[in-house]
Amino acid sequence: MKRVQGGRTIELEQYIKRYQLAMHTIYRGIGNMIKQYVHEDVTTDQFLTLQYIYQHGSITASEIAQEFGVGRSAITAIVNRLVEKELLIRKRSKEDRRIIALMLSNRGKEVVEATEKAMYRFLQEKLKHFELDDIERLLNSIEKFALLMETNA
């Protein structure tokens, strides 16, 4: 798809490919940072699940699957691994035995907190190569794009 802007023809497909490559590289870099500095046995997807539960307290696997836009079976597999690693606890509801809430264990909280600290240090090191105005523009663009993705606009 071509788009004319300011007399220039822009190949949107090229931008999309650049975006995909950049996001993949960032995702992989954060995953490597987690393995190297925090917990070699926690994947990026597992960490994102732990972090989401940390932020929300108690939540069901269905709620996580809906928020992440993945199937319940994918979340169940991640949850099973996190329970095996003693980072997550399942607790059955007293009111409705069919509902199982997920909560972090103390060890799970420690992993999230340590990973977030390491991630902030890691990202601060990368971001210091940018001017504050560039960081602000980057974040504004990412937030605008995220809003468009969320609203399916």
Image (cartoon, helix red, strand yellow):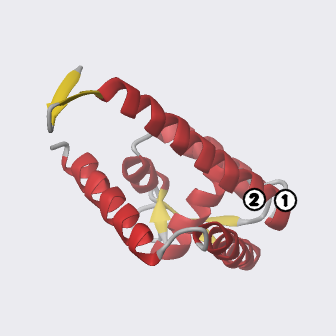
Q: Are marks 1 and 2 in contact (CB under 8 Å)?
A: yes
Q: Position of residue 56 (x, y in %)?
A: 45, 73
Q: Indicate the quadrant containing the N terminus: top left, top right, bottom left or bottom right.
A: top left
Q: Nearer the viewer, residue 91 or 116?
A: 116
Q: Residue at x 15, y 38 (%)?
A: 6
Give how far across and how far down residue 51 sits, in percent.
Answer: 57, 67
In the current view of this chain or complex, which residue is farthest to the front?
7
- The residue located at (83%, 66%) in the rendering is 37
In this orientation, does residue 74 appear?
yes
Residue 65's place in the image compared with 112, above or below, is above
From the viewer's perspective, tell me whether residue 77 is left or right of residue 37: left
What amino acid type should be assigned to the residue bearing mark 1? Answer: Gln
Q: Is residue 84 left or right of residue 28?
A: right
Residue 24, horizontal then vertical, whole percent: 57, 40
Residue matched to label 2: 33
Residue to which mark 1 is pinned: 36
Q: Secondary structure at mark 2?
A: helix
Judged from the image, the secondary structure of the residue bearing numbered disc 1 is helix
Q: Position of residue 120 (x, y in %)?
A: 63, 75
